[in-house]
Image (spheres, rainbow, N blue to C red):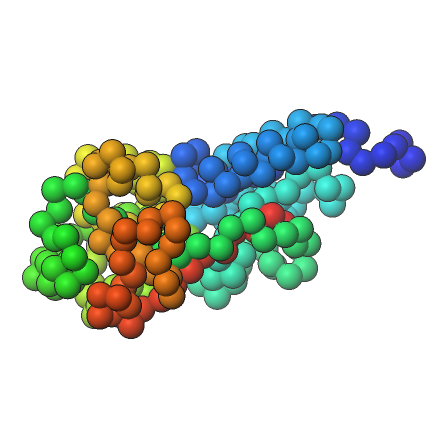
Amino acid sequence: AAAQSFPSRPLTLVVPFAAGGPSDVAARIVAQGLSEKLGQQVVVENPAGAGGTLGSLRVAKAPPDGYQFVIGNSGTHAWSQALYKKPPYNTITDFAALGLVVEAPRAIITPKNFPANTLSEFVAYLKGNQNTVKYGSAGAGSASHVSCILLNAALAVDIVHIPYRGLGPAMQDLIAGRIDYMCDSPSTSRPQIETNNVKAIATTGAKRTSVLPDVPTAREQGLDFEVTDRKSVV
């Protein structure tokens, strides 16, 4: 058995969020390429929960044989180490980084009927309706959650957080108007923006993203704010 070439059986790529979100989309692209490259099927699984830490913990505890790996992001493998009093895993010692997959800003999006079209109007509405406005994320401690926490701090507002098991379910509630905004990935926001299901207020990079070239950055609209997310296979 030790002499067998790797891989000799299917592999599992864990996405620690619900299907349909940006991590899931990236993982399925990666899985397809790896399957062709390795000559073995790479199966994508979605054990979601706890802002991505449950799925990441599963891989941290898996046998170190290379057959199970995870697509982590800033939330699961950076911010989690500071947000939890006792993190469920150690990013440095429990994982080996294989490569960076995506680096992208966030897109601040709202339901299509949200009463603001620009960042200044968005800020004014939030400040005037802090008791009723809600924002969603892929779970407590996730990249989408912390991105919105940083945004809210920059705007000096205190908004109710609604956590989900991934940005896919959060997007469904955003479209339905059950939440008021979220800090999504431009890649998964774009189809919903183009079909007028949601509205883009701003992106959070240093410059406009090619995915949403018509959406101005927060800095272009007068707010000194920048945040990006990195997704890596580990």
Q: Is residue 166 visible from the viewing direction of this image?
A: no
Q: Nearer the viewer, residue 169 or 53?
A: 169
x and y percent of residue 132 in the render? 12, 52
Please indicate whether residue 119 sits to the left or right of residue 84 in the image.
Answer: left
Q: State which quadrant residue 62 falls in.
A: top right
72 sits left or right of 163 in the view: right
Q: Residue at x 16, y 57 (%)?
A: 118
In the image, taking residue 38 as reference, residue 81 lies left or right, namely left
Residue 180 % position (x, y): 19, 47
Most extreme residue toward the right is 3
Q: Is residue 224 above or below residue 160?
A: below
Residue located 68% across and 54% down the image = 96
Q: Nearer the viewer, residue 195 or 121?
A: 195
On the rendered structure, is 62 left or right of 1?
left
Image quadrant where residue 94 sits: bottom right
Q: Residue at x 22, y 41 (%)?
A: 198
Q: Position of residue 114 (x, y in %)?
A: 13, 46
- Total numbered labels: 0
Residue drawn 20% across the image and 50% down it: 134
Task: Choose between 217 and 47: the one closer to the eye.
Answer: 217
Can residue 230 be seen here? The reply is yes
- Quarter occupied by the N terminus: top right
Looking at the image, which residue sits at the far bottom? 224
